[in-house]
Image (cartoon, helix red, strand yellow):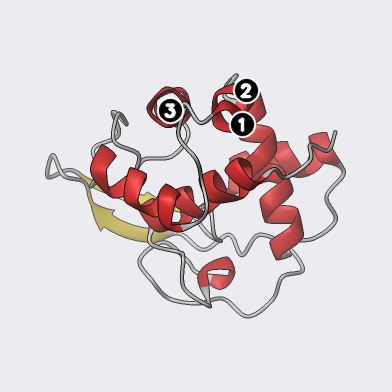
Amino acid sequence: MSLALTPNMNAFLATIRCCEGTNGPDGYRMLFGGDLFDSFADHPRVRVPFTQTDGKPNYSTAAGAYQFLSRTWDRMAAKLGLRDFSPASQDAAAVELIRMQGAVDDVNAGRLQVALDKCAPIWASLPASTYPQPKRTYAFAERAYLNNGGTLA
């Protein structure tokens, strides 16, 4: 399934990348923690240890512009028939996750906070996320959204 990338959807994708810290030129090659991987052939599947904001040790396999966990990537790749971890494939999988959260209409209508809240169970850095990891504020997300051409309702 492929959805058209409207200006608001492009801005929302950029907002997620800004919140995740992957909005730079190497964002599509970024591992959790900031190191880079070399090949877009597949999700890199690197386990990176970290300490959660609640002090508990954990690890993450998050990678790419949208910091896909390897298990999430495998599910999206199978569902969408994605054959690599290229930027286009990462974008397609992110849009599908947004669709699965029921947020596409909110994104396209400019209901930013509603869309962010619906997507918070997916992306740990979004303002309403319950993951014990650092989060961005709604103000940060709104600035990123507007700076990337998004329009608000």
Q: Is residue 97 above or below residue 24?
A: above
**Name of the residue lying farthest toward the top:** 102
Say left or right for 138 vs 151. Answer: left
**Name of the residue lying farthest toward the left:** 55
Q: Amino acid at mark 3?
A: Pro
Q: Residue at x 75, y 55 (%)?
A: 89
Which element is circle 3 on? loop
**Residue 13 appears at what percent x and percent y?**
55, 48
Dot placed on the residue nearer the N-terminal end, 3 or 2: 2
Q: Residue at x 45, y 64 (%)?
A: 22
In the picture, the quarter occupied by the N terminus is top right
Report the residue marked by disc 2: 105
Q: Nearer the viewer, residue 11 or 61?
A: 11
Q: Name which quarter of the figure residue 101 lies in.
A: top right
Q: Residue at x 75, y 59 (%)?
A: 88
Say left or right for 102 vs 133. Answer: right
**Disc number lying in front (3 or 2):** 2
Which element is circle 1 on? helix
Report the residue marked by disc 1: 108
* Distance Cα–Cα, label 3 vs label 1: 20 Å
* Distance Cα–Cα, label 1 vs label 2: 5 Å
Determine contact: label 1, label 2, CB under 8 Å.
yes
Q: Name which quarter of the figure residue 102 lies in.
A: top right
Report the residue marked by disc 3: 121
Q: Amino acid at mark 2?
A: Asp
**Residue 93 appears at what percent x and percent y?**
69, 44
Q: Amino acid at mark 1?
A: Asn
